[in-house]
Amino acid sequence: MNAYLPSIYQPFVRGSHTATQYEQKVANRKNDKPLTPSDIVSLSRPLLAAKAAYMLRNGQKPVMPWVIAMGASDWLDGTTARIIDKILPDSGWGCTAHGADNDIYADAAALLEICTGALSAPNVSIYGKLAVTAILAQEGYKFAWALNTNRHYINIVAKRRSILTKLAYANIIDEIPTIPEKIPIPSATQGKSAMADKFTAVALAVATNDLPQGKMRTGCGLAAVAFAAVGTWNGEMVRRTEYESHANDIIQSHINSFTEESTLLRAT
């Protein structure tokens, strides 16, 4: 049974990868530059959101141009990376192993900033505030889950690295395998479309700040609630069915490896 709600963005979203593919990508992209043009575009998104949130809290208009620029940056970062890869393949300045992660972090930070601003904005309608409240709740819960899960992963990986170092020092293993610094979470088309729905809901909520009282403002508010419902429901579903299950599997695999390696070290 498919528990996801239909999204208008689903047919246009692509580019999923598994956790194993992520680990391979990290291991194979040794030439990646730490800061690329697409990273700068991604980092601009929270800054644009902060400006929009400030304007919302102070009842200023229009805010939509800043939200449009924020949305454009979400498209531009990936496009910039792909163009650079075509012009300068394997240069490390285009698509990088950390680029997708930066995009996710930028999206989450921008959403939290602008939703917080809209919630305290004097000119955002009640429907707009209802929409951003739902998004804030789901994104906040996801953020807390990600922090706790990654903390657990870092702890077990640190213990495993310690055992692997001792095994290598004792010449029991030839080399220490590469282990990602943070937990590799797969991307999913449902997650990407859910984020697009949430950004649309935020844009419609912000529109109620700029529009005068009337049917159009009410319509934007109701549409914001609808998009927020789809985005938050699908976002939580993909977190449970995709991200959480993969994270638990990865952590358990490191626990199993740690147990086996500890037994091997004690036997020497």
Image (cartoon, grey):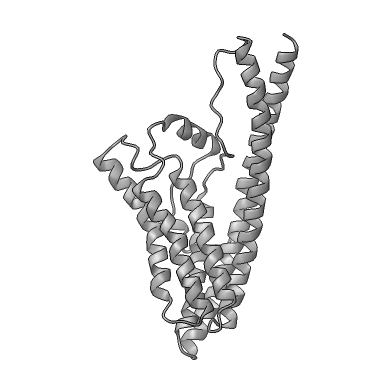
Report the residue at 37% width, 62% height from top.
72
Q: Quadrant of residue 91?
A: top left
93 and 135: which is toward the camera:
93
Q: Name the quadrant of the C terminus.
A: top right
132 left or right, relative to 203: right
**99 is higher (above) or lower (below) than 155:** below
Residue 49 in picture, x, y percent from top left: 47, 66
Left or right? Give the position of 209 relative to 134.
Answer: left
Residue at (38%, 59%) from the top-left corner?
A: 73
Q: Nearer the viewer, residue 20 or 111?
A: 111
Tell me residue 32's x, y (percent): 39, 36
How many numbered tags mark residues here? 0
Is the residue 87 above or below the residue 192 in the image? above
Front-lying residue, 267 or 43: 43
Residue closest to the eye, 10 or 28: 28
Would residue 12 appear left or right of 143 to someone viewing this image? left
Q: Who's the residue at 41% across and 70% down the image? A: 66
- Give the quadrant of residue 166: top right
Could you tell me if residue 47 is visible in this image? yes
Q: Is residue 51 above or below residue 60?
A: above
The x and y percentages for residue 110 are 50, 62
Residue 9: image location, x then y, percent: 46, 61
Q: Residue at the spot x=63%, y=60% of the render?
A: 140
* Residue 68 relative to residue 109: left or right: left
Can residue 249 be seen here? The reply is no
